[in-house]
C-alpha cells in the first residue's frame, strides 16, 4: 500500500473518530442544555405561580377589607338609625307616661300598685311607712293617702310619675317611679319588644 492510501485511511479514521467524539459531546451539551432549559422553565413557572398567588392573595385581602369596611359602615349606619329611632320612641313613650300621669285613672293606678306592694310584703305592709309623690302629683295626695292608708310626702325630684315607698327602720325605698321603670326598659331595649 502506498503511503498516500495509508494516509487517506488514517485521515478518514481520524475524521470519523473526531465526528463521533464531536457528536457525543454535542449530545452531552444538548442534554445539559435541555436540563438547564427545563430547570429555568420550572423556576420561571414556580416564580410566576408565586407572583400570581401573591397577587391573588393581595386582591382577596383587598376585597375582604372592602367587604369588611362596607359591613362596618352598614352596621354603623344601622346603629345610628336605631339610636335615632330609639330616641324618638323614648321621647314618645316618655310623653305618654307624662300624659297618663295627668289622667283620671292615674290616682287609682297609684293606689292599686302601692296596695299590691304593701300587701305582698312579708309583714303585710307594716314596714311601709309612707308613699312619696312628685310635686306635680301633690294635688292627688289626699286621695292616695286615703286609698293606701299611708302618709304622703313630696319629692323635689320630678320622676315623671309613679311613686316611691319608704320602708321603716331600713332606710330603704321601693322605687316605682315611671322614670326608673322607663330607664330599665330603655336599658334593656324592652320598649321594642326585645329582651
Image (cartoon, grey):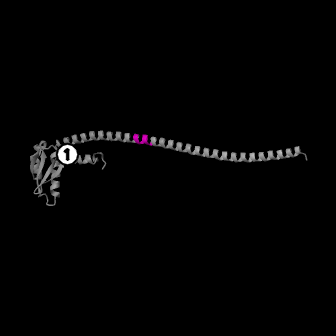
Residue 32 in the image: state x and y as whole percent.
67, 47
With respect to residue 167, does 81 lie above or below? above
Q: Residue at x 77, y 46 (%)?
A: 18
Residue 114 in the image: state x and y as whole percent.
15, 52
With respect to residue 53, does 124 lie above or below? below
Q: Residue at x 53, y 45 (%)?
A: 50
- Count of numbered circles in the view: 1
With respect to residue 168, does 78 lie above or below? above
Residue 159 in the image: state x and y as whole percent.
17, 44
Q: Nearer the viewer, residue 39 or 174?
A: 39
Q: Residue at x 43, y 41 (%)?
A: 65
Mark 1, Cα crowd under 10 Å, few <14 / some 14-19 / many 20+, is: some
Task: Report the residue that reaches farthest toward the front.
Answer: 3
Left or right of 14: which side holds 170?
Answer: left
Q: Nearer the viewer, residue 25 or 96?
A: 25
Left or right of 151: which side holds 7?
Answer: right
Left or right of 58: which side holds 156?
Answer: left
The overriding secondary structure of the stretch rendered in magenta is: helix
Find disc 1 in the rendering and name its residue. 179
Task: Report the residue that reaches farthest toward the bottom.
Answer: 122
Badge 1 element = helix
Task: Report the residue that reaches farthest toward the right.
Answer: 1
Magenta-span inclusion, residue 158: no
Quadrant of the image occupied by residue 118? bottom left
What stretch of residues is rendered in magenta? 64-69
Residue 43 in the image: state x and y as whole percent.
58, 45
Amino acid at each position: 500500500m502506498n503511503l498516500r492510501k495509508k494516509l487517506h485511511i488514517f485521515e478518514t479514521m481520524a475524521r470519523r473518530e473526531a465526528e463521533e467524539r464531536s457528536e457525543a459531546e454535542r449530545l452531552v451539551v444538548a442534554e445539559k442544555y435541555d436540563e438547564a432549559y427545563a430547570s429555568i422553565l420550572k423556576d420561571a413557572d414556580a416564580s410566576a405561580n408565586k407572583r400570581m398567588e401573591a397577587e391573588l392573595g393581595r386582591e382577596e385581602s383587598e376585597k375582604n377589607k372592602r367587604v369588611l369596611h362596607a359591613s362596618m359602615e352598614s352596621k354603623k349606619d344601622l346603629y345610628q338609625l336605631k339610636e335615632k329611632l330609639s330616641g324618638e320612641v323614648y321621647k314618645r313613650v316618655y310623653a305618654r307616661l307624662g300624659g297618663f300621669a295627668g289622667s283620671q285613672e292615674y290616682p287609682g293606678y297609684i293606689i292599686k300598685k302601692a296596695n299590691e306592694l304593701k300587701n305582698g310584703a312579708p309583714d303585710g305592709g307594716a314596714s311601709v311607712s309612707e308613699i312619696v309623690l312628685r310635686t306635680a302629683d301633690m294635688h292627688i295626695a289626699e286621695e292616695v293617702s286615703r286609698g293606701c292608708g299611708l302618709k304622703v310626702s313630696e319629692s323635689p325630684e320630678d320622676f315623671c310619675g309613679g311613686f316611691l315607698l319608704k320602708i321603716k327602720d331600713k332606710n330603704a325605698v321601693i322605687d316605682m317611679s315611671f322614670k326608673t321603670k322607663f330607664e330599665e326598659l330603655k336599658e334593656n331595649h324592652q320598649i321594642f319588644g326585645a329582651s
